[in-house]
Amino acid sequence: MTFGGSGTIFQAIGGLGQEDADAFIGQTLDAGVNFFDTANVYSQGQSETMLGKALGAKRKDVVIASKVFGRMGPGANEVGLSRLHILRSVEESLQRLGTDYIDLHQIHGFDPVTPMEEMLSALTDVVRQGKVRYIGCSNLAAWQIMKALGISAQEHLEKFVTLQAYYSLAGRELEREIVPMLLDQKMGLLVWSPLAGGFLSGKFTRAGVSEEDSRRSKFGFPPVNLEKTYDIIEAMQAIGERSGATVAQIALAWLLHQPSVTSVIIGAKKPGQLKDNLAAIDVKLEPADLEKLNKVSELAPEYPGWMFGFQGSDRRPGQVRDWSRIPSK
């Protein structure tokens, strides 16, 4: 998402040129990374083009994921998940990436005006034509994913094997409905914005921003609860000082410790940031560290979740009803 700079948003997020992209891809390949995520809408196709050029002959050694949904032009058929737009977008993405297949093609969001049957049928066609290996989804609710899986099973269509979603210590809403669904359905979880748009990078504290050239300062996304997130950052700082890890590494390591997470998608604008993020795989959080991070970032009790824990205790031998999880005014 940092490759290219077409449009105000993508200029703020990255704005990296081809030379930078080549260097970053080389650095990640040397570190053992073999999964690269892009989308046709990132800088209006520039990201896909730059990724394809940067990978070159290494393409056969990696997994490439892209997406379809966002607007690619002014016309009525240049956005969404209609059969026409999906088929056209796949061909255009293949051309930009310089490859004859996409390993994982994901819908980038929910299209309220296209029947799911039409969308899944088109995605099935591109899989059976050999242009796509697997299909996934992004930014969907649990009920939407389950509806799609049901249609795929009933109509013998390709099914979503992964969800790409926002998940971080500053945003754990995914745990209410989606994480249990993913574990139950054995779907993979690819995390986007694991540092909450840079807010968990270590640059932001209650004292202010330590670096002016910050994506978060220009583009405040995704939204965070500031006071709660500052508490989380302070907890990460304490753990980092003891373990010799940076705040960003602690944030990434926490995600890597979650059983629902398949992979974490990192993005950087500077080689130093990328090096720091890649080192997160070597950070081992102790049980006490995880408990501290889980506590400071936990979600407020919400129905019906607190009711499940209360009623379900009688079905789990030795478990006592946790009255503290029931909200009180």
Image (tube, grey):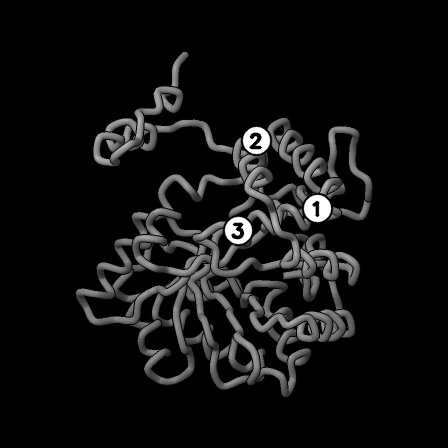
320, above or below 246, in the image: above
**Residue that mark 3 sits on:** 257
Mark 2 residue type: Val
Q: Disc 1 or 2, which lies upstream in sequence? A: 1
> Quick check: 79 left or right of 202?
left
Question: Where does the C terminus fall, quadrant-wise?
Answer: top left
The circle on residue 296 is: 2
Residue 64 percent coordinates (x, y): 53, 74
Residue 119 percent coordinates (x, y): 32, 65
**Residue that mark 1 sits on:** 201
| Residue found 75% across the figure and 40% down from its top | 241
Q: Is residue 80 in view?
A: no
Mark 3 residue type: His
- Give the residue furthest to the left: 154
Q: Nearer the viewer, residue 281 or 233?
A: 281
253, above or below 240, in the image: below
